[in-house]
Image (tube, rainbow, N blue to C red):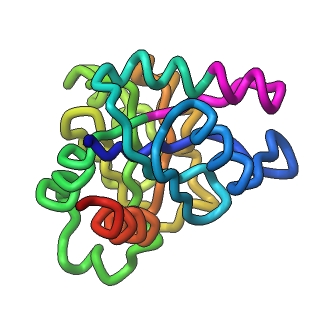
Amino acid sequence: MPVIISLLRGINVGGRKKIKMAELRGLYSLLGLRDPRTILQSGNAIFKTDETDLALLQARIEGGIRDQFGFDARVILRGAADFRAIFDRHPFTEEQGSEPKKMIVVFLTGCPSLAEVEQLRASNPGREFIQADGSELFVFYADGQARSKLDNNRIERALGLASTARNWNTCQRLLKLLEKTEP
């Protein structure tokens, strides 16, 4: 049975769009998703499902969130193999690897064009390293994320795709949970 990683965008930030992870697991169970597990409070979940159409599954989860919690939240899904591949193809250097909080994976709803990524780099006022690979952006925030102008909104406007970002530590925690979930 396939294992899927689900990443919610913009929940539990600044006291808005609150979802307790126990309630999210409950919703996933109601939607027929098996063995849902969550980490942190930012909408990171792993579950098993027979559904193979990720677009349909995404719409079903987003609809469930709207119905149960009364607001819209974007859901980005990755299969286990696709998520695992992030660790094989990331462009971060060994030096950057010593600062995992500055290493960010931006999960996108599609693959941006090379021209869109170049435009994002050209319009970015900061010193961030930006590398696209498939439906992910790998960003190293040299000066940290807090002061950066390169946020999800800027990325989404430049690429025309929805996004949600996770730092390298969170990605590694998700990978460990994925390994525990798979048979």
65 inside magenta stretch: yes
Find residue 162 and report its horizontal and vertical position in percent: 49, 26
50 or 115, nearer to the observer = 50
Q: In which quarter of the image is the N terminus?
A: top left
47 or 94, nearer to the observer = 47
Residue plotted at (81% across, 32% down): 69
8 inside magenta stretch: no
Query: Residue 100 occupies which quadrant of the picture?
Result: bottom left
Residue plotted at (20% across, 25% down): 114
Residue plotted at (34% across, 71% down): 176
Above or below — where is 135 with respect to 82?
above
Q: Quadrant of the C terminus?
A: bottom left
Find residue 30 and report its horizontal and vertical position in percent: 63, 34
Residues rendered magenta in the picture: 63-76
Above or below — where is 85 with respect to 50?
below
Query: Residue 60 occupies which quadrant of the picture?
Result: top right
Find residue 48 and report its horizontal and vertical position in percent: 38, 45
Residue plotted at (22% across, 64% down): 92
Above or below — where is 125 with respect to 115?
below
Given the current orientation, which residue lies at the most extreme bottom position?
Answer: 98
Horizontal side of 176 relative to 28 (left or right) equals left
Find residue 8 and report its horizontal and vertical position in percent: 57, 41
